Image (tube, rainbow, N blue to C red):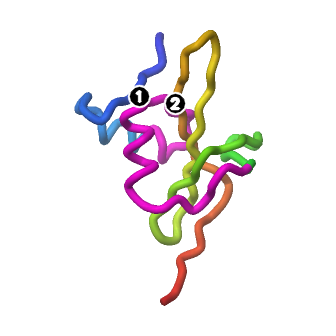
């Protein structure tokens, strides 16, 4: 079975969030990847982080809203094709007090 590649307009938003929140490696389209990069300022930027599966990954940005586990986003390129991914990290975003 092929892995689902999620898109902003595929009607599978809830399925995407469930897969992400379960710690699965999630593949998405460039449009969805850019959405997450634009929705809030990143809490991680171009650094290596510990992923939920125990491995380490260089992420282009990390997203979290408030005090929650950071989701890392990165790309992989092979044979001229760019693929877009995200997965939970082991790192918690600390909520900043004003």
Q: Earlier in the sequence, mark 2 or mark 1?
A: 1
| Residue at the image point whose x is 31% and y is 41% from the top | 14
Total labels drawn: 2
Residue contact between numbered discs 2 and 1, judged by CB atoms under 8 Å: yes
Residue 82: numbered disc: none
Q: Secondary structure at mark 2?
A: strand
- What is the C-alpha distance between the residues marked 2 and 1? 6 Å
Q: Left or right: where does residue 34 sit relative to residue 90? A: left
Query: Residue 81 placed where, x, y %?
Result: 55, 16
- Near mark 2 (Cα within 10 A), the count class, few <14, some 14-19 or many ≥20, is many
Q: Is residue 81 magenta?
A: no
| Residue at the image point whose x is 54% and y is 33% from the top | 85
| Residue at the image point whose x is 46% and y is 49% from the top | 37
For residue 32, which quarter of the picture?
top left
Query: Residue 29 placed where, x, y %?
Result: 41, 28
Q: Camera-side residue: 72 or 88?
A: 72
Q: What residue sits right under mark 1 in the picture?
A: 29
| Residue at the image point whose x is 57% and y is 62% from the top | 43
Q: Is residue 2 above or below residue 14?
A: above
Query: Residue 20 placed where, x, y %?
Result: 48, 42
Q: What residue sits right under mark 2 in the picture?
A: 84
Q: Left or right: where does residue 87 sit relative to residue 46? A: left
Q: Is residue 61 above or below residue 85?
A: below
Query: Residue 61 placed where, x, y %?
Result: 58, 50
Q: Is residue 18 above or below residue 6?
A: below
Q: Left or right: where does residue 83 sit relative to residue 28? A: right
Q: Residue furthest bottom?
A: 98
Q: Which residues, given as a range, are shown in magenta?
A: 19-47
- Near mark 1 (Cα within 10 A), the count class, few <14, some 14-19 or many ≥20, is some
Q: Secondary structure at mark 1?
A: loop
Q: Is residue 23 magenta?
A: yes
């Amino acid at each position: 079975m092929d892995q689902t590649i999620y898109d902003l307009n595929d009607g599978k938003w809830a399925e995407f969030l469930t897969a992400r929140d379960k710690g699965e490696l999630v593949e998405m389209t460039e449009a969805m990847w850019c959405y997450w990069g634009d929705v809030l300022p990143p809490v991680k930027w171009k650094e290596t982080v510990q992923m939920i599966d125990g491995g380490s990954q260089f992420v282009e940005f990390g997203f979290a809203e408030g005090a929650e586990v950071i989701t890392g986003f990165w790309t992989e390129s092979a044979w001229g094709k760019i693929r877009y991914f995200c997965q939970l990290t082991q790192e918690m975003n600390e909520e900043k007090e004003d």
